Image (spheres, helix red, strand yellow):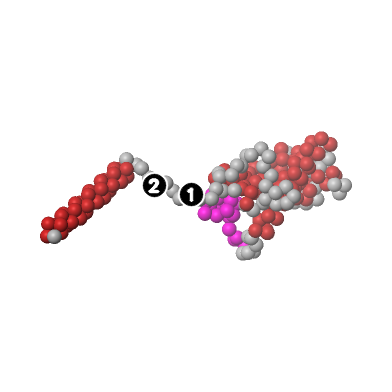
């Protein structure tokens, strides 16, 4: 019986030594992998779907027939969404400006008498001076002030006037109005180049 007990203790000690050796070998192998640059695989996350973002609205839903913005590439989506918002905001102003400039002009530098209506005024003096000033001002704002923050949604530059209107409904409205304005501005320009009529004349307002 004494011999059997001694044998059992020896067997248990042998198993403990074997387990300790295996643990040491595993730790050594893990350390070598870290030294060689092996990294643990990240946890699988759900892929990014552009169709689930703001702006995918009826009746077209997420309209991307050319697959310019495929699922899984959030960086590409952010770049394209920022560009869409920027063009939409510019053309909303442009479409209004193309009409209002036919009736409202600056009372200095000869704007009221020497500048024609329509897009042709951009290259005329003194309107060309105003165009240059506008381009410089926009460049400064774009490069130094209105810069995209990766921690915010594309095109979100804050709410400096405190309107508290940055919600999903207003973001959808802005995207829809911007998309419409891009078509409207392009249509006004093409029609003027084709017919020679400015925006007010096209609408029968002048």
Rendered residue at 81%/45% (across/down): 199
Question: Who is closer to the viewer here, 9 or 79?
Answer: 9
Residue in the foreground of this view, choosing between 66 and 43? 43
Q: Is residue 41 left or right of residue 121?
A: left
Predominant SS along the magenta part: loop
Residue 64 among those drawn in magenta: no
Q: Residues within 10 Å of mark 2 (few under 14, many from 20)?
A: few
Which residue is drawn at the image coordinates 68% and 55% (left, top)?
172
Looking at the image, which residue sits at the far front? Answer: 1
Residue 13 in sight in this render: no
**Residue for badge 1:** 44
User: Which residue carries the number 2 mark?
Assistant: 40
* Nearer to the camera, 124 or 187: 187
Residue ranking furthest to the left? 2
**Label 1: which secondary element:** loop
Q: Position of residue 180 (x, y in %)?
A: 74, 48
Which residue sits at x=38%, y=45%?
A: 39
Labels 2 & 1 near each other (Cβ < 8 A): no
Q: Residue at x 59, y 48 (%)?
A: 49
SS of the residue at dot 2? loop
Mark sitting on residue 116: none
Q: 153 or 186, which is in the foreground?
A: 153
Rendered-image quadrant of the N terminus: bottom left
Where is residue 90? Give x, y as percent: 68, 47
In the depicted structure, whether residue 161 falls above or below residue 10: below
Residue 108 x/y as whole percent: 73, 49
In this picture, which residue range is highlighted in magenta? 142-161
Q: Answer yes or no: is residue 34 visible.
A: yes
Residue 95, horizontal then vertical, whole percent: 75, 47
């Amino acid at each position: 019986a004494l011999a059997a007990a001694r044998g059992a203790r020896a067997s248990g000690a042998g198993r403990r030594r074997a387990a300790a050796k295996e643990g040491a070998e595993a730790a050594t192998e893990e350390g070598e992998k870290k030294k060689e640059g092996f990294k643990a695989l990240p946890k699988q996350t759900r892929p990014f779907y552009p169709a689930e973002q703001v702006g995918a609205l009826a009746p077209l839903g997420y309209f991307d027939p050319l697959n310019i913005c495929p699922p899984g590439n959030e960086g590409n989506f952010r770049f394209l969404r920022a560009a869409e918002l920027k063009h939409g905001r510019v053309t909303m102003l442009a479409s209004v400006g193309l009409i209002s400039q036919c009736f409202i002009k600056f009372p200095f530098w000869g704007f009221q008498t020497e500048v024609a209506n329509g897009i042709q005024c951009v290259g005329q003096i003194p309107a060309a001076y105003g165009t240059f000033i506008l381009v410089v001002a926009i460049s400064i704002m774009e490069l130094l002030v209105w810069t995209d923050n990766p921690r915010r949604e594309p095109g979100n530059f804050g709410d400096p006037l405190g309107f508290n209107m940055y919600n999903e409904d207003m973001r959808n409205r802005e995207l829809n109005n911007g998309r419409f304005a891009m078509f409207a501005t392009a249509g006004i320009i093409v029609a003027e180049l084709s017919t020679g009529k400015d925006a007010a004349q096209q609408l029968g307002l002048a």
